[in-house]
Image (cartoon, helix red, strand yellow):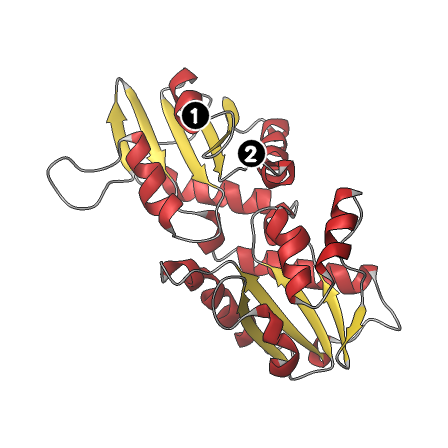
Amino acid sequence: MKLGSDAAVVLVGHGSTVNADSSAAVRQHAAELRRRGLYAEVREAFWKQEPRLAEVVGRLACRRIFIVPVMASEGYFSEVAIPRALGFEVSGGPGWRRVLESAGRTLVYCRPLGTHEGVTGVILARAEEVLRQHPFPRAPRPAEVSLFIVGHGTEQDENSRKAVDQQVERVRSLGRYASVLPAFLDQEPSLKGCYEAAAARNLVVVPFFMSDGMHVREDLPVLLGEPAERVRQRARAGLSTWRNPTERRGKLVWYARSVGTAPLFAEVIIQRITEADAWG
C-alpha cells in the first residue's frame, strides 16, 4: 500500500462541548495538511463534539482512509473507544486490528501521536520557545533549568502516564537540563509538588496535552499556585492565565504552551501516517 491521491486522512480529537479551545489544535493541523496537498482529503473529527468520527468516516469517498488519534497516550479513548466504534475489534477473539477492509475501503488506524519519538523535539522546542520569548531577567541556560513534562494521568489506566514517562527519559538522556521530571494533573507526582522536586531555581513547565483547553488554560496554572478566581477571570477575558516568568516560593516559573498546538506537530502526524502506510 502506497500513499497517493486516493488516500484520505481523518484527525480525530477528544473534543469538548464546553470549551472551543479543545478542538483548535486538531483544526489547525488539518488545515496545515490540506495546505500541503499531500492527501486527497483531510478531515477533522471528534469524540465528544461535531463533526462526529463515524459520520466523517462514513462520508469519505476515498478507497484508503488513515485515522490518526490526536491524543497524548495509549489510553481508553485511543485504544478502546475509537477502535470499537469503527469496527476494528476482531470478531470472536481478543484485541483488535489496525487495518480493516470494509465495504471496498481500507481503514488504517494509526498509533496516537503522543507516543511518537518525534514528540521529544516538540517538547524541547516548546521549552526553548518560552524562555526565548520571555527572557526576564535573562533567559537561563538549560543547565540552570528544571524541566517538568506535565500530563493528565489517571489511576484508572496505567498507560495514561506511560507516554509522559517515556518522554521524560528521552529528554533526560540528552543531559541538557539540571533535571527533567514528570508531573500530572490527576495522579502523583502532582504538578503542585514541582517546587519541592525542582533541582534548579528556574522551572519550565511544558504541558503534554494535545490542546490549550481547560486543563492547560485553567487547571494547571491553579496547581502552580495561581488563584483560581483570577485564572477564571483571565480565561473568560481571553487573556493569558500565567505571566512568564512568575516567581513562586523562591522559584522562577515559565509556563509553555501545550505540545499538541505546536506547528511542528504536523511533521509528527505525517510520520505517523507514513508509518501506518507500511502495514497494508
* Camera sees residue 258: no
The residue at the point 60 percent across, 76 percent down is 193
**In this rendering, which labeled residue sits more in front, label 2 or label 1?**
2
* Camera sees residue 195: yes
Residue 241, quarter of the rendered image: bottom right
Q: Position of residue 47 (x, y in %)?
A: 45, 34
- 231 vs 110, left or right, is right
Q: Which residue is mark 2?
A: 17
First reached walking from the N terminus: tag 2 or tag 1? 1
Front residue of 101 and 201: 201
Mark 1, other Cα within 10 Å: few <14 / some 14–19 / many ≥20? some
- 139 vs 124, left or right, is right
From this view, report whether residue 213 is shown above or below residue 228.
Answer: above
The residue at the point 51 percent across, 30 percent down is 49
Q: Quadrant of the N terminus?
A: top left
Q: Which residue is mark 1?
A: 7
Q: How many marks?
A: 2
